[in-house]
Image (tube, rainbow, N blue to C red):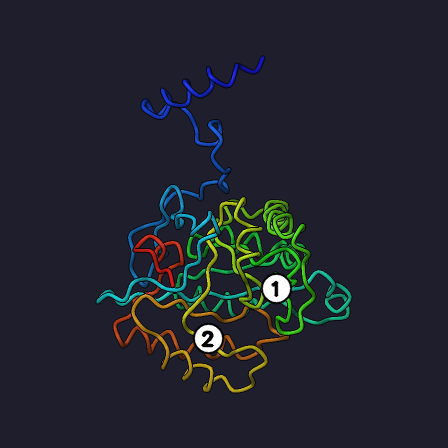
Amino acid sequence: MIPPVRRLTALCALGAALGALTLTACGAPRQPKAPRPAAPAHTSAVPSAVPSRPPTLAPGPAGLTPVFHHAPRTADRTVALTFDADMTADQGARAAAGEHFDNPGLIAALRALKVPATVFMTGRWAEEYPDQARSIGRDPRFEVANHSYSHYAFTGDCYGLPTVPESRMRADVERAYTAFRTAGVPDAMPYFRFPGGCYDKRALRAVSGTGVTAVQWDVVGGDAFATDADAVARQVLEGVKPGSVVVMHCTRSAAPTTERAVRTIVPELRRQGYRFVKVSELIGTGSGRR
């Protein structure tokens, strides 16, 4: 039998004081599942540690989904490489015809170089490549974050992408998490990257109930449809600052030079004294709002 509202309110107050009740039981938004146990200590040669509960930003004004761009500019030379595993909901026929929306060579290179990274994955990509999604998600060097289910835009006029109706935006984000679980990804992070990086207040409001932090970037890799790996590497190296978030892609058909660019970027940034971390570590260092 459900207790009266006043009794629940009193119980929540007592539970908060004693640490005995969960936030969900007392009406706070449900958060995504906590991640796997922390990895070993931070160095560029081992996976960066993830706290028992992944750090997120507090909601913005009027409860809007918070947006993270980069860590505070400090003397700590950290940088997060992020890779968007894009696949729209209607590209199944192209995959069946042999188009590769995955990039196993890139993931193998990151492993060989011992680089932690965050992969923003669409639910449709996880459905198409469940073995790869599971392998990435179970590797403590990486973390999987949400890039929507459909890779449809959350605003109009976003690089020609189809759009998600406002009434379906939250469901699209949640459907991606369901696809990750079905593929065997154990603990996807509570971070969301809008397709195309396109968002507005309406979109921030629509997904606020999911408990995610939206993650943008301050360095554009420029690897989408690029054919010159050296040009991509130069663009990244010229843009990186302490606390940067770099956006690149994990899609052979749309970003065929990314692996080669990464093999240039990583040793050069290490030579400059940078340490590679996952997005969760950057978010844990400060607000990063803009």
Q: Nearer the viewer, residue 85 or 156?
A: 156
Mark 2 vs 1, N-terminal side:
1
- The answer to the question of whether label 2 and label 1 lie on touching residues, with beta carbons closer than 8 A, is no
Q: Nearer the viewer, residue 212 or 109?
A: 212
User: In percent of the image, x 32 and y 24: which residue is there?
Assistant: 17
Where does the image place residue 63, in percent across and percent down from the top left? 46, 47
Give the SS element for disc 2.
Answer: strand
Where does the image place residue 163, in percent across and percent down from the top left? 68, 63
Q: Which dot marks residue 251?
A: none
Quarter of the image for residue 110 reads bottom left
Quadrant where the C terminus lies? bottom left
Q: Answer left or right for 153 relative to 191.
A: right
Residue type (three-letter) at the residue carrying disc 2: Val
User: In percent of the image, x 45 and y 86: which residue is there?
Assistant: 230
Q: Nearer the viewer, residue 13 or 221?
A: 13
Quarter of the image for residue 44 reads bottom left
Q: Which residue is mark 1?
A: 155
Q: Which dot marks residue 220?
A: 2
Quadrant where the N terminus lies? top right
User: In percent of the image, x 43 and y 76: which residue is there?
Assistant: 263
Residue type (three-letter) at the residue carrying disc 1: Thr
